Image (cartoon, rainbow, N blue to C red):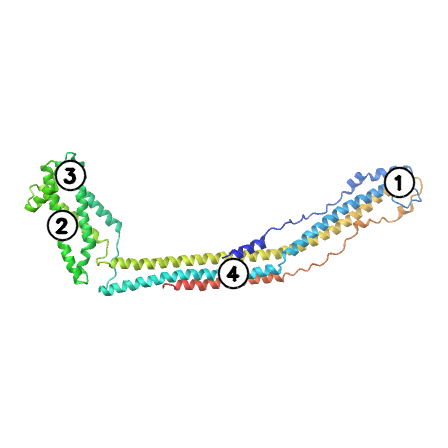
């Protein structure tokens, strides 16, 4: 969404091609050093020894010409630097002002940010509506189930299901160990062989208990008489299977010991049919009782994994899952909306900062331009003064040693060359900061609008599914 804004921030904050000039553009001339470099005094004395220039001379001497040339050279360098720095400041001022295209981009970016926030919220709201309808459908399904089955209670919550499953698994393991201990008497491999052969019987016994708890026991209180009748049949079958299986295990244990580990299913079935309760060994009877006890404990534990009424827990779970998905989606949508708002606000704030930075840059550039001009004016005066003093130094040194009359022009004031004349006043630049201020006002307006839009869309999300 904030693509247009981010591009605008980059455009407004992009670095310039040039850097701001140094505060010290025009270095002062060291008069004594320059006089030594040009050998002004020495050359004046040399000319004086031969009374040069003659009294009738009206032109400059070579020394004076060299002084003028040196000052002209320095002035030319300073003027070139002045023009370069002046162009830099004026170019910076022109670029810092907002053009019509930038103002249009600012307007479009603000409108786009609000529009994108609204469109993203609409997409998320549509997804929430689908989930809300799913939750309503699951609620209707739940209510119809309660009505059809005459239920006026809430579903029984399944607490600590992992614990119950661990207990059931422990029952399988414990019965397998006990069976193995009892079978060890007739096994050639001792207790290890007994456990390995008895574990399957223990698993079958506990599976019978779990199956009864899941598919038969809940139907005992069903609203349908058909279901209750089937539950009675199933319970009867379960009781028969419970005693039959554990008695078979007891007979298997006795035959297992008598035949030294080679008891067959046919022999167990024949003995179970002819004398089901004819267990000769007390340990075999104890094995039967332990098997029944473990089975009943498994029935009690497994019954806690489901609601007592068949199908009630499943329909309630579907309803709860639908509402949980709706709540999670609503939270996600609000977080996404908040993220979009925060990003848009951050980039709008950066845009405002960049615009204000341009306004500050214009002010700095105008001040720098003015200081540059003042510095150039001072430098031109300084060059003119240096020229005058160098020429005057030459004339004074010449006058001290010559024996003839000096040229009349030696008594005339020295006029500096045109290269160090005072520059013209700076031209006024058409600088208008009102566009920058209006751009800031528009971005601040869009900041308020994005917050309003967020509040509006967030209220839609908070109301969805309530």
How far apart in space, not on screen, are marks 3 and 2 (Cα)? 24 Å
Circle 2 SS class: helix
Circle 3 SS class: helix
How far apart in space, not on screen, are marks 3 and 4 (Cα)? 79 Å
Q: Residues within 10 Å of mark 1 (few under 14, many from 20)?
A: few
State which tag comes first along the sequence, 2 or 1.
2
- Left or right of 375, for residue 408: right
Residue 241 - label: 2
The residue mark sitting in front, 2 or 1, is 2
Circle 1 SS class: helix
**Is the residue 441 above or below the residue 187 in the image?**
below
How far apart in space, not on screen, are marks 2 and 4 (Cα)? 74 Å
How far apart in space, not on screen, are marks 4 and 1 (Cα)? 84 Å
State which tag comes first along the sequence, 3 or 4.
4
State which tag comes first along the sequence, 3 or 1.
3
**Is the residue 46 above or below the residue 12 in the image?**
above
Image coordinates of residue 385 in percent, x first then y, are 80, 48
Circle 4 SS class: helix
State which tag comes first along the sequence, 2 or 4.
4
Image coordinates of residue 404 in percent, x first then y, are 94, 41
Image coordinates of residue 112 in percent, x first then y, are 52, 61
The furthest residue to the top = 188
Residue 112 - label: 4
Q: How crowded is mark 4: few (under 14 residues within 10 Å), some or many (20 or more)?
A: some
Residue 400 - label: 1
Residue 444 in view of the camera: yes
| Residue named by callout 3 | 181
């Amino acid at each position: 969404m904030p693509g247009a804004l981010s591009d605008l921030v980059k455009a407004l904050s992009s670095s310039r091609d040039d850097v701001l000039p140094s505060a010290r553009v025009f270095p002062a001339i060291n008069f004594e050093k320059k006089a030594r470099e040009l050998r002004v005094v020495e050359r004046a004395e040399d000319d004086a020894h031969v009374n040069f220039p003659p009294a009738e001379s009206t032109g400059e001497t070579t020394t004076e010409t060299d002084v003028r040339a040196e000052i002209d050279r320095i002035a030319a360098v300073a003027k070139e630097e002045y023009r370069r720095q002046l162009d830099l400041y004026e170019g910076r001022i022109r670029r810092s002002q907002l053009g019509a295209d930038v103002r249009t981009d600012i307007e479009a970016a603000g409108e786009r940010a609000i529009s994108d926030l609204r469109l993203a919220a609409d997409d998320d709201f549509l997804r929430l509506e689908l989930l809300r309808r799913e939750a309503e459908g699951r609620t209707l399904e739940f209510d119809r189930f309660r009505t059809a089955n005459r239920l006026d209670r809430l579903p029984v919550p399944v607490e600590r299901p992992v614990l119950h499953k661990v207990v059931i698994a422990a029952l399988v393991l414990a019965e397998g160990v006990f069976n193995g201990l009892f079978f060890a008497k007739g096994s050639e491999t001792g207790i290890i062989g007994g456990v390995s052969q008895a574990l399957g019987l223990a698993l079958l016994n506990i599976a019978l208990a779990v199956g009864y708890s899941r598919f038969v026991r809940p139907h005992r209180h069903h609203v349908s008489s058909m279901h209750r009748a089937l539950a009675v049949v199933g319970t009867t079958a379960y009781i028969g299977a419970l005693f039959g299986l554990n008695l078979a295990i007891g007979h298997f244990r006795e035959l297992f010991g008598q035949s030294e580990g080679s008891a067959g299913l046919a022999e167990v079935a024949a003995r179970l049919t002819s004398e089901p309760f004819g267990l000769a060994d007390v340990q075999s009877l104890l094995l039967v009782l332990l098997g029944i006890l473990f089975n009943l404990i498994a029935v009690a534990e497994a019954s806690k994994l489901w609601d007592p009424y068949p199908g009630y827990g499943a329909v309630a779970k579907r309803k709860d899952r639908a509402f949980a998905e709706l709540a999670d989606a609503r939270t996600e949508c609000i977080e996404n909306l908040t993220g979009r708002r925060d990003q848009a606000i951050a980039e709008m704030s950066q845009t405002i900062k960049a615009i204000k930075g341009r306004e500050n840059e214009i002010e700095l550039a105008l001040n720098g331009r003015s200081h540059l001009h003042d510095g150039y004016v001072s430098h031109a005066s300084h060059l003119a003064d240096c020229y005058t003093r160098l020429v005057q130094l030459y004339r004074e040194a010449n006058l001290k040693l010559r024996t003839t009359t000096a040229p009349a022009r030696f008594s005339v004031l020295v006029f500096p060359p045109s290269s160090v004349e005072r520059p013209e006043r700076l031209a006024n630049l058409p600088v208008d900061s009102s566009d920058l201020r209006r751009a800031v006002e528009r971005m601040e307006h869009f900041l308020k609008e994005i917050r309003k839009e967020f509040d509006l869309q967030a209220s839609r999300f908070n109301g969805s599914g309530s």
